[in-house]
Image (cartoon, grey):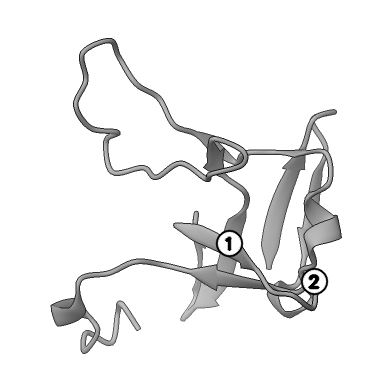
């Protein structure tokens, strides 16, 4: 499930497989990228090219717990569907927790 936050403060839950670009109209970033004058990095957060922050938060049940995650990128396909992308070092791709 993806949680999308809107300018009016509302949060909408959308199944990941049903996400469309239109779902993000008038949305605001889930997490803003913060910086301090002179800071040379962004504390592990990546900015979205169009919004300056990550567009949504994902939730999934893992065992008996619900886990939340803010993805690195949300790609928009020509069809209007979206694809969630997380960036991980190649050597971590064999780790079942990462997968």
Q: CA distance from mark 1 to mark 2?
A: 12 Å
Question: Among all residues in the image, which is located at the extreme left?
Answer: 91
Q: Nearer the viewer, residue 27 or 9?
A: 27
Q: Residue at x 44, y 31 (%)?
A: 33
Tag in front: 1 or 2? 2
Residue identified by numbered label 2: 80
Looking at the image, tell me whether mark 1 or mark 2 is earlier in sequence order: 1
Q: Nearer the viewer, residue 49 or 66?
A: 49
**Residue 6 in which image quadrant:** top right
Q: Residue at x 78, y 61 (%)?
A: 21
Q: Considering only vertical position in the picture, is 84 above or below 39?
A: below
Q: Residue at x 20, y 71 (%)?
A: 89
Q: Dot 2: what SS?
A: loop
Where is residue 49? Give x, y as percent: 53, 44
Could you tell me which quadrant the N terminus lies in? bottom right
Does 35 sit left or right of 93 as displayed? right
Q: Considering only vertical position in the picture, is 51 above or below 17?
A: above
Where is residue 19? Give x, y as percent: 76, 69
Q: Which numbered tag is attached to residue 85?
A: none
Could you tell me which quadrant the C terminus lies in? bottom left
Q: Residue at x 79, y 78 (%)?
A: 79
Characterize the local packing of mark 2: few (<14), some (14-19) or many (20 or more) Cα atoms within 10 angstroms: few
Q: Nearer the viewer, residue 60 or 56?
A: 56
Where is residue 27? Give x, y as percent: 76, 41
Residue identified by numbered label 1: 74
**Residue 94 in which image quadrant:** bottom left
**Residue 96 in which image quadrant:** bottom left
Where is residue 67? Give x, y as percent: 48, 64
Characterize the local packing of mark 1: few (<14), some (14-19) or many (20 or more) Cα atoms within 10 angstroms: some
Does 88 sit left or right of 10 as displayed? left
Q: Considering only vertical position in the picture, is 71 above or below 15?
A: above
């Amino acid at each position: 499930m993806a949680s999308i936050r809107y300018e009016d403060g509302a949060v909408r839950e959308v199944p990941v497989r049903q996400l469309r670009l239109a779902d993000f109209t008038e949305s605001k970033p889930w997490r803003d990228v913060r910086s301090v004058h002179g800071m040379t990095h962004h504390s592990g957060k990546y900015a979205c090219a169009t919004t300056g922050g990550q567009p949504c938060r994902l939730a999934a049940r893992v065992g008996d717990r619900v886990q939340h995650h803010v993805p690195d990128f949300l790609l928009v396909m020509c069809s209007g569907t979206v694809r969630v992308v997380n960036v991980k070092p190649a050597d971590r791709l064999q780790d079942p927790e990462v997968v």
